[in-house]
Amino acid sequence: MFRILVIAAALVCCLEATPRALRRSDLRGGGRIVGGTDADIKDFPYQLSFQYRGRHSCGASIIGEDWAITAAHCSDDMSADEVSLRAGSSTSGKGGEVYQVTDIIIHEQYEYYTIGYDICLLKAATKFKFGDGIAAIPLASVTPTVGTILTISGWGTTFEWGTYPKQLQQVQVPVVDHAKCSEYYEQYGGVSDTMLCAGLSTGGKDACQGDSGGPYVANGQLVGIVSWGKGCARPQYPGVAADVAHLRKWVTEKTGI
């Protein structure tokens, strides 16, 4: 589930560039976005808590009546019977509805060394009970332009390996030029065409550990999936997401959505 990004030729330098899931040994439930504010699930009805053996591990989003989407590194090496999804709750550890997962579909080109194609589909055992606080979000078909403001939500830490308040958090960050982002991450191999970057040059606002797999949203559409970054909210190291528009064809092939 959790992999430290390792570039074979530069092992030592890459230890800080990590996926934003929680280590299984660090699961404490709850969590929050860096630099964010409290959020209500009614305003983020697509948001899910991806739970490993009953405890919050990652974020996820509802995309269909019985389908959810998350990051591949969140579910790598897991079996479906270990995973459930909590929907309709502003806290990650109680309330709402809990759905067992029956199928985990990781992108065939997912690569844990580079965290490429970091996308995964989750099939719920029963249909989501759509209503107040539970709803699907449409998938973007076009990558947002530089400067577009994206909203991230989740229960990730308040700072790198920080504390875990249980209330859902949200924060807004702008899309960063892809070429510039790749320069920032040059020592880690850069960012691929299937990745999207968003953040402030000064840092201070970002996703963090525990937010992996959660949504980046613009104009009511899912545009990205929280994936990785160097630390959390560091200057000149924006968050990196899986670009939904680039990966949508694969989602449709697997789900019909």
Image: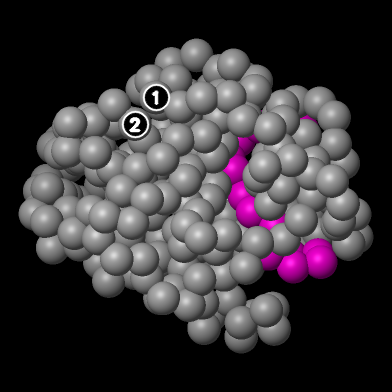
Disc 1 residue crowd, few under 14, some 14–19, many 20+, Cα 10 Å: some
Can I make out residue 127 in this image? yes
At mark 1, the secondary structure is loop
Return the mark for residue 168.
none
> Sequence order check: which comes first, mark 1 or mark 2?
1
- What's the distance in space between the residues labelled 1 and 2, CA to CA? 5 Å
Q: Nearer the viewer, residue 25 or 172?
A: 172
In the rendered image, which residue does mark 2 sit on?
205
Relative to 200, residue 101 above or below = below
Q: Quadrant of residue 196?
A: bottom left
Relative to 233, residue 199 above or below = below
Residue 113 drawn in magenta: no
In the rendered image, which residue does mark 1 sit on?
35
Disc 2 residue crowd, few under 14, some 14–19, many 20+, Cα 10 Å: many
Residue occupying image coordinates x 24% and y 38%:
200
The percent coordinates of residue 132 (x first, y second) are: 84, 46
Give the amino acid at mark 2: Lys
Visual colour scheme: one colour
The percent coordinates of residue 90 (x first, y second) are: 72, 30
Residue numbers of the magenta segment: 54-67
Residue occupying image coordinates x 81% and y 26%:
94
Q: Nearer the viewer, residue 116 or 229?
A: 229
